[in-house]
Amino acid sequence: MKKFGLFFTLLCCLFIWGCSEKRSNRNDGFKHWIQNNGKIKVLSTTAMIDDLVQQIGKGHIDTITLIQGELDPHSYQLIKGDDEKLAFADIIFYNGLGLEHGASLYHHLEHNSKAIPLGDQIALQDSSHIVYVNEQKDPHIWMDISLWAKTIPVIAQILSQKDPEHSAEYSTNANKLVGELMTAHEKTKQIMQAVPENKRYLITSHDAFNYFTRAYLSEEGEVLSGEWTKRFAAPEGLAPESQLSTTDIRNIIKHMQKYNITLLFPESNVSRDSIKKILQAGREEGLKMEIACCALYGDAMGPPGSDGDTYLKMIIYNAQTIADCMKPEEGLTASQKSRRNVIAAENY
């Protein structure tokens, strides 16, 4: 018992140390960002936005991300210190389209003249770009690289208005970044189009992959007709809540049976409870179902040093992981086969 108590105490200490280190890193980042050094202070709600902002503004701006790590942007509420960050920022970029709907954050963004909703800007340019799920706008526009690239000119324009002296640099950086994103967009299409058409059906934890499906899993005719929606389904809606009814589970199982789908993909920052319930229900009916071992990046990028620690790495990783799991096993490389490994629900 003494050994167990010592082991438990050690674990608690390690946990507290880890939390303290993360807090310290966040505080150091904030202290640097808040320095009065003449640079534009830009706050982005998500890491995906911050990634673009950094590459456009480079050395002329200081950036910080409000919703860090694997926190859920859908439900994020302001915490101690956030008011100070929002007040100090010269510019605030947020996703919009209903992503940041935690009451305290939503209220602040909606009533702040410094806050720019990038997704809503895209919707104003062309409403046909926006996917609707149960009559709600789908905010996960970053999952289509070509669509996310449309936010770049908006970011460059806002930075230029605030800092006309460096407007030419912002424009040059933006044009270069658009080119890089469009190259990655074509690469992602090639990765997914290498998968047989009848295998390109995706099930994930929540409705984060509609734009990805429309852009990369679907046939051109399906995009034009709207039939691309059959290629993606999720047990949870646009905001993950882990509250499934038996009807929700039944609908997903029927969809999987109809299109011969056997694999469920978890997401890095979403509870696996929902897909585990589907797996259990499907197996009770004698159906072949498994959970992919590699979680996809949906609402959050990966930690530093991971396969998803930049926006483009995150999307390419998702595409490669999905493709490797969907392709027939014959002809796969050793690394691709490792992605095909699946883990039963009891191992989660």
Image: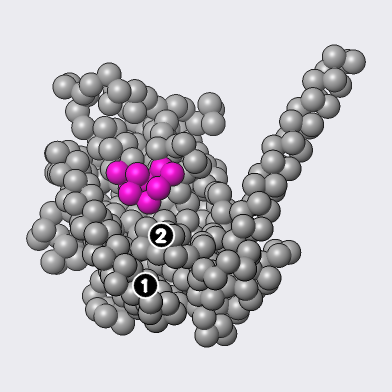
Residue tagged 1: 166
* In the image, farthest residue toward the left: 221
Can residue 27 be spotted in the picture? Answer: yes
In this view, the residue in front, 156 or 317, is 156
Magenta segment: 308-316
In this view, the residue in front, 194 or 200, is 194
Q: Is residue 123 left or right of residue 111?
A: left
Secondary structure at numbered mark 2: helix
Q: Is residue 247 left or right of residue 230?
A: right
Question: Residue 166's quadrant in the figure?
Answer: bottom left
In this view, the residue in front, 348 or 301, is 301
Q: Residues within 10 Å of mark 1 (few under 14, many from 20)?
A: some
Question: Residue 263's quadrant in the figure?
Answer: top left
**Is residue 78 covered in magenta?**
no
Q: Residue at x 24, y 75 (%)?
A: 128
* In the image, farthest residue toward the right: 2
Residue tagged 2: 58
Q: Earlier in the sequence, mark 1 or mark 2?
A: 2
Q: The N terminus is located in which quarter?
A: top right
Q: Residue at x 59, y 61 (%)?
A: 33
> Tag 2: residue type?
Lys
Residue 341 placement (x, y as % from top left)? 37, 25
Residue 5 placement (x, y as % from top left)? 86, 21
Can residue 78 be spotted in the picture? Answer: no
- What's the distance in space between the residues labelled 1 and 2, CA to CA? 11 Å
Q: Residue at x 25, y 55 (%)?
A: 181
